[in-house]
Amino acid sequence: MPRPVHFEIHASDPERAITFYTTVFGWAFEQWADQPYWLVRTGEGVGIDGGLVPRRGPEPGPDTPMAAFPVTIDVADVDATINAIENAGGTMAVPKGAIPAVGWLAYGTDTEGNVFGLMQPDPGAR
């Protein structure tokens, strides 16, 4: 069965994006040789790592429809994560809502205009 093995964050300002993801999730970034590309390490154990690359086109506008596969990030506390996102300069694209018997889902927007998902597992979510 196909499964995600890598992701890329496209950023108009890579340093600003690195600061955002380091502040919110504690991810580690390492520039790949002298290339304008950073490897993203999201943690130990099950999960995927990815990369960050300068955006190859215009920055999405606030009304641009989503035209990508958003990566959803497993979080222990969606409310605390929403707070961290907003404090780091991000915004919420879709507010927190229940996925019954699964958990709490929300979509955030980073400082680069990229949308990503947050999932807090909770079988009692209603």
Image (cartoon, rainbow, N blue to C red):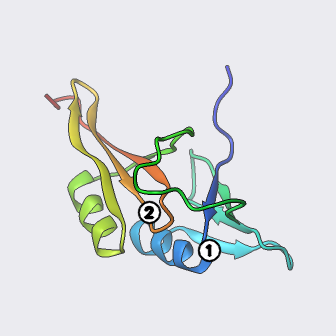
Q: Which residue is mark 2?
A: 110
Q: Which residue is mark 1?
A: 14
- Residue in the image at 36% along x and 73% along y: 89
Q: Is residue 51 left or right of residue 25?
A: right
Q: How many marks?
A: 2
Question: Label 1 is placed on what type of residue?
Answer: Pro
Give the alpha-carbon distance from disc 1 to disc 2, as whole Å.
12 Å
- Residue in the image at 27% along x and 59% along y: 82
Asked if the residues shown at circle 1 and circle 2 are in contact, with their CB atoms under 8 angstroms apart, the answer is no
Expressed as whole percent of the image width and height from the top left, the position of residue 123 reads: 22, 29
Q: Which numbered disc, 1 or 2, marks the residue that appears first in the sequence?
A: 1
Q: Is residue 21 left or right of residue 51?
A: left
Disc sitting over residue 74 in the figure: none
- Residue in the image at 40% along x and 50% along y: 63
Residue located farthest toward the right when viewing the structure as drawn: 34
Label 2 crowd bin: few (<14), some (14–19), many (20+), radius 10 Å: many
Question: Label 2 is placed on what type of residue?
Answer: Asp
Expressed as whole percent of the image width and height from the top left, the position of residue 47 reads: 57, 46
The C terminus, quarter of image: top left
Q: Secondary structure at mark 1?
A: helix
